[in-house]
Image (cartoon, helix red, strand yellow):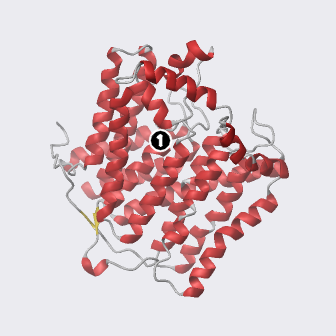
Amino acid sequence: MLNALSKAAFACLWCFVFVLPWDVYAELPVVGSIPRLVGIVASTVGVLYICARRRVRPLSWFHVLTFLFVLWAAVSTLWSIDTEATRTRLLTYLQLTVLVWLIWEIAWSPQRTRALLGAYVLGVAVASVATIRDYLSGEHAAGYAGRFNALSINPNELGMTLAIGLPMAWYLSLSHPQRRVARLWQLYLPLAITAILLTASRGAFLTMLVALAIIPATQGRLRLRTKAALCVLAPASLVLAASFVPEATLERLQTTRADIESGYFGNRGFIWRAGLEVAREHPLVGLGAGTFGAAVEPTLGFQWSSHSVPLGILVEDGLVGLLVFLAIIGAAFTALRRAPRLPRRFGIVLLLALGVGSLSLEWGYRKQFWFVLGIVAAEAALRPRPQDVIDLGSTAGSPRPRAAVPRVVAAADQ
């Protein structure tokens, strides 16, 4: 019975990760988007499984710090300038905390963590195909002339969502024992690169370049001929994608450097300056979680999102919240030190890509952002047996979950 419930909980979690890239697609009455509906089912079944198991895994520092961050967001309700917005953001943080906890509790083997990575790659592959289809049919993104998207997602967010799937697909191709299946995962690269260019998102383009660093970072002791073939794959994908993408879209991407040097940052510069002014006035505890828009409204005349994860947290949660948040990221990096070489390099590249994209996008409360953190923490906690350690590019063994510090064990039904 428990084994069947475990499989059901993992299947629901897999389905939730699969639909994550469609976060704002197909709004439904009462329950909202498809990911939210699937997330409710996955959370319910996952909690039932943990209760039936009557134990929880020892938490890592990453999870403890995540709980502290959510607790600080809850405390900020006391001085929030927009209590309703803070309560809404707190509810979102609680849902995201459940997500990373379920990944930790349910994805306890390398087969399961990589299956979740595969679910995400399949989901973003669907979004990539839909974006290319929109381009072929001439359907421009609403409000973004010359740019293309899919599933009613903002082009910038879509591009970022697709970009962080690149290192996942490459990692899966290196981890799979069958070469033909591995090649199928690598097909995501040209598909995603084309779709990212079609979104014309400059932030996603920079994130993509960082994400593609997974290729030279994981070549290891491969034969020279294999290395040469792998090094050709990414540039060739870029060239092919560029020949497919309309010239107007490429011209927008070419303005990235000039836009950064001018301090304009795609209409973000004045928002960031307004946010920094507010942060200087309320540096320690901020103005309350979820209140960035209300905080900059007196200066800008209307509410804007922060378009930057660190700045948004600094304004809303102050230096205290920002330091806890940075500690969460640091805990994820630190946990990778004991991981085998291939998962370690994969985790580092994935976190770096996420960090670059988060500098120009307000992703601190998005499911994709916390899924990446949660899956990296889960992968880093898997310790392979000595006989299972294999060079880069080979199939990973069957790691055992290691007890993390601090040890926080409690009955699941308490």
Q: In this view, does 141 lie to the left or right of 305?
A: right
Please determine whether, in this image, residue 175 is positioned above or below residue 263: below
Observer-nearest of 335 and 172: 335
The residue lying at 62 percent from left, 52 percent from top is: 206
Does residue 45 appear anywhere in the picture?
Answer: no
Please determine whether, in this image, residue 230 is positioned above or below residue 24: below
Q: Quadrant of residue 399?
A: bottom left
Which quadrant, please, contains the C terminus? top left
The residue lying at 35 percent from left, 18 percent from top is: 77
Please determine whether, in this image, residue 156 is positioned above or below residue 404: above
In the rendered image, residue 150, in percent from the top left (x then y), is placed at: 69, 44
In the rendered image, residue 386, in percent from the top left (x then y), is placed at: 25, 78
Mark 1, residues whose alpha carbon is within 10 Å: few (<14), some, or many (≥20)?
many
The residue lying at 46 percent from left, 36 percent from top is: 310
Residue annotated with mark 1: 367
Observer-nearest of 155 and 118: 155
